Image (spheres, rainbow, N blue to C red):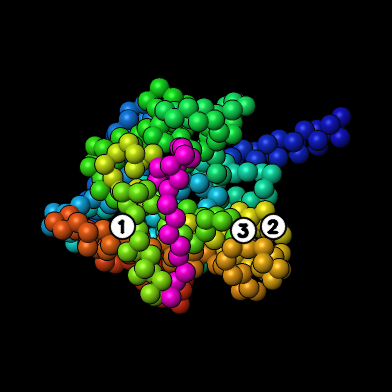
């Protein structure tokens, strides 16, 4: 009897601990917007069906004193790509907009931050050093939580193209654009984001991503054909600064991606940025919070030596600071290029640290705590 009670007590403790861990994945990290913030909205303001669910997510609006264009920055489309949402968090906590508007959705697929891929061995959280101590952030998944959308079909039929994709892509936000009001959970999130773009008359969309070091589209800006001039000028400026970026055209026969469908189905110029993240790669070794932050991995160092990676990968790895810095500088140059091509619709902002400042000090040193 005593043995049974002990086992029962241990099982109860395990359930209590695992339940607490599960609930913690549903609690958004606190963000500390700058005084430049003019409005804090929800995605459900543009599509009420999402209200109150895991797909409903915050939209931060920053307006300058002078009129101009509107830029939308999306982080967290894929929540196992932490530089994407951390760059968005950093902008929220540093941005000072003087002209035009900047809209930021830091957790585009918020549901994907409520779980992670256990089979990948990803940590649930990782920590970043700030001037105020360490801040903990969640590591999410590439896909919508199956608690919100299940089961996956054997084949996902993209709407409206009718292209056949992998069944799991039905939970991949970046395969579900432009979305459907009466579609799956993920398609409804995509539909809401498209509605935000239409209703707010967004001029430029910048979708932030990461990819494995062996992925062919890496350290790149991908652009819809209408956004190609803007992206080309940005890439030339970035290369002039000594930063390696490639310019990639959005494929016309591959559907569901933000740069393809948002460019086709809204008036916005649609772009996407990729940085190199070893914690996503197939060739990585031990996967833990240290790998997420430092980007150091001896398996990838060896892979680079035998030319199996698309980017240089030495003993120093590709740390989170560099990946966030690339997104911040790429965003800055895309906006500057947009300004040069669209007189009267300029978007001007300051506050965000430069690439060199982030690399020297770490992006966490520019994040803030509540006053």
| C-alpha gap between disc 3 and disc 2 | 8 Å
Q: Which mark is residue 350?
A: none
Answer above or below: position of 40 versus 156: below
Q: Which mark is residue 214?
A: 3
Look at the magenta stretch and give its main secondary structure: loop
Position in image of residue 11 (x %, y %): 74, 36
**Figure disc tally:** 3
- Tag 2's secondary structure? loop
Does any portion of residue 86 appear in the rendered image?
no
Residue 169: in magenta span: no
Circle 3 packing at 10 Å, graded few (<14), some (14-19), many (20+), is: many
Q: Earlier in the sequence, mark 3 or mark 1?
A: 3
Pointer 3 with pointer 2, Cβ within 8 A: yes
* Residue sitting at x 51%, y 41%: 112
Position in image of residue 164 (x %, y %): 54, 30
| C-alpha gap between disc 3 and disc 1 | 27 Å
Q: Which mark is residue 283?
A: 2
Task: Residue under label 1, please give it.
Answer: 229
Answer above or below: position of 205 versus 369: above
In the foreground, 105 or 225 = 225
Placement of the C terminus among the 4 image quadrants: bottom left
User: Start and end of the magenta stretch?
Assistant: 242-260
């Amino acid at each position: 009897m005593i043995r049974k009670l002990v086992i029962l007590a241990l099982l109860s403790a395990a359930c209590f601990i695992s339940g607490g861990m599960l609930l913690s994945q549903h609690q958004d990290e606190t963000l500390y917007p700058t005084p430049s913030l003019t409005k804090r909205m929800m995605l459900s303001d543009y599509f009420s069906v999402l209200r109150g669910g895991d797909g409903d997510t915050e939209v931060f609006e920053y307006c300058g004193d002078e009129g101009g264009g509107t830029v939308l920055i999306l982080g967290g489309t894929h929540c196992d790509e932490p530089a994407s949402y951390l760059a968005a968090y950093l902008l929220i906590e540093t941005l000072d907009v003087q002209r035009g508007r900047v809209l930021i959705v830091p957790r585009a697929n918020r549901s994907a931050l409520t779980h992670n891929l256990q089979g990948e061995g990803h940590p649930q959280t990782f920590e970043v050093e700030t001037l105020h101590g360490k801040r903990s952030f969640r590591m999410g998944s590439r896909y919508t939580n199956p608690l919100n959308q299940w089961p996956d079909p054997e084949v996902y039929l993209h709407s409206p193209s009718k292209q056949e994709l992998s069944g799991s892509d039905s939970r991949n936000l970046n395969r579900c654009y432009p979305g459907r009001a009466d579609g799956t959970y993920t398609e409804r999130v995509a539909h809401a984001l498209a509605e935000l773009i239409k209703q707010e008359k967004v001029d430029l969309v910048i979708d932030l991503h990461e990819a494995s070091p062996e992925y062919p589209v890496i350290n790149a800006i991908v652009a819809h054909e209408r956004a190609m001039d803007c992206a080309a000028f940005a890439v030339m400026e970035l290369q002039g600064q000594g930063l390696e970026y490639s310019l990639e055209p959005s494929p016309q026969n591959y559907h569901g991606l933000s740069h393809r469908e948002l460019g086709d189905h809204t008036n916005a110029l649609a772009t996407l940025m990729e940085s190199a993240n070893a914690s996503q790669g197939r060739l990585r070794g031990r996967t833990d919070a240290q790998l997420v932050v430092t980007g150091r991995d001896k398996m990838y160092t060896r892979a680079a030596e035998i030319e199996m990676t698309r980017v240089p990968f030495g003993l120093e790895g590709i740390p989170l600071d560099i990946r966030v810095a690339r997104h911040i500088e790429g965003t800055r140059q895309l906006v500057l290029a947009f300004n040069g091509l669209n007189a009267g619709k300029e978007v001007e902002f300051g506050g965000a640290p430069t690439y060199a400042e982030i690399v020297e000090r770490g992006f966490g040193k520019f994040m803030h705590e509540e006053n």
